[in-house]
Amino acid sequence: MGKKVKKKQKLKKRAGKKKKRTKKPYLVSKLFKVEGTAVKRLRKYCPVCGSGVFLAEHEDRWSCGRCGYTEWKKIKVKAKSK
């Protein structure tokens, strides 16, 4: 292969690559709160997986990342006035 072909191949390889995003470290302080000598857990446990696996809190639901268990939050419906 000639020089031009090799140069074009290098440009094609580099063209579609995206930048990698840096991951933020997960803060344990979001899950626990220390009150005196007692430790309070701020999130619910997964009933399927057992204690130690927390449910992720979303706007309308709680979900387990390990087994996929989902609990839906109760949505408050505003009363229509006539």
Image: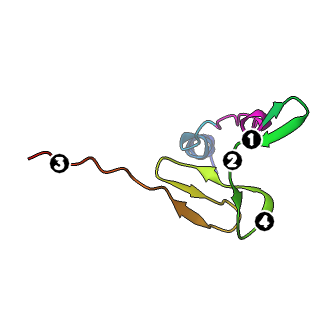
**Marked residue nearer the N-terminal end (3 or 2):** 2
Query: Residue under circle 2?
Result: 43
The label nearer to you, 4 versus 3, is 3
- Between 14 and 22, the one lying in front of the other is 22
As measured in the structure, the alpha-carbon distance from the residue carrying label 4 to the one carrying label 3 is 41 Å
Residue at x 63%, y 51% (from the top left corner): 56
As measured in the structure, the alpha-carbon distance from the residue carrying label 2 to the one carrying label 1 is 6 Å
Residue 45 percent across, percent down from the top left: 72, 57
Query: Residue under circle 4?
Result: 50
As measured in the structure, the alpha-carbon distance from the residue carrying label 1 to the one carrying label 4 is 16 Å
Q: Which residues are magenta?
A: 20-32
Query: Residue under circle 3?
Result: 80
Q: Is residue 57 magenta?
A: no
As measured in the structure, the alpha-carbon distance from the residue carrying label 1 to the one carrying label 3 is 38 Å
What's the residue type where badge 2 is placed? Arg
As measured in the structure, the alpha-carbon distance from the residue carrying label 2 to the one carrying label 4 is 13 Å
